[in-house]
Image (spheres, rainbow, N blue to C red):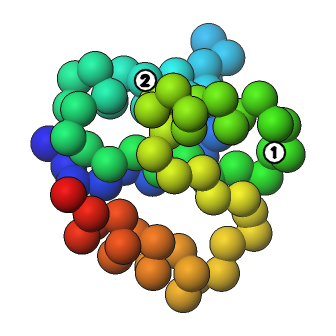
Amino acid sequence: AFDVILCDYNLEDPQQRDGVWLLERVRVEHPVTRRILITGETQTSLRQHVDSGVVQLLLLKPVEPDDLLAHLRNTHTVT
């Protein structure tokens, strides 16, 4: 298992699945893995996935590299 998974919302998937779909699977199979979704989408509906616990952190693009590293370090230290 991984400590953290960082996934983009838009996946190159022929079956039209997205990052939320992937993080839902991770939550079921690896519930202790921290789940971060990164997106350029501004859909307010994405927030519901944070509220439901599928996504633990939602980051909007563009994310500065130093900010991303800080989020990853912070997420990794949260128990």
Q: Which residue is mark 2?
A: 24
Q: Position of residue 49 (x, y in %)?
A: 58, 30
Tell me the quarter of the image containing the C terminus: bottom left
Asked whether, in this view, residue 79 is left or right of residue 13, the answer is left
Residue 50 disc label: none
Asked whether, in this view, residue 17 is left or right of residue 3, the answer is right
Vertical comparison of 71 with 19: above or below: below
Residue occupying image coordinates x 21% and y 32%: 30
Residue occupying image coordinates x 54% and y 87%: 66
Distance between the alpha carbons at the discs numbered 2 and 1: 19 Å
Residues tagged 2 and 1 counted as in contact (Cβ below 8 A): no
User: Furthest-top residue in view?
Assistant: 15
Vertical comparison of 7 with 68: above or below: above
User: Furthest-bottom residue in view?
Assistant: 66
Q: Callout 2 environment at 10 Å: few (<14), some (14 to 19), or many (20+)?
A: some
Q: Position of residue 34 (x, y in %)?
A: 32, 48
Tell me the quarter of the image containing the N terminus: top left
**Quick one: SS at disc 2?**
helix
Q: Is residue 4 visible?
A: yes
Q: Callout 1 environment at 10 Å: few (<14), some (14 to 19), or many (20+)?
A: few
- What's the amino acid at mark 2? Glu
Residue occupying image coordinates x 68% and y 37%: 47
Quarter of the view holding residue 11: top right
Residue 41 disc label: 1
Quarter of the view holding residue 19: top right
- What's the amino acid at mark 1? Glu
Quarter of the view holding residue 67: bottom right
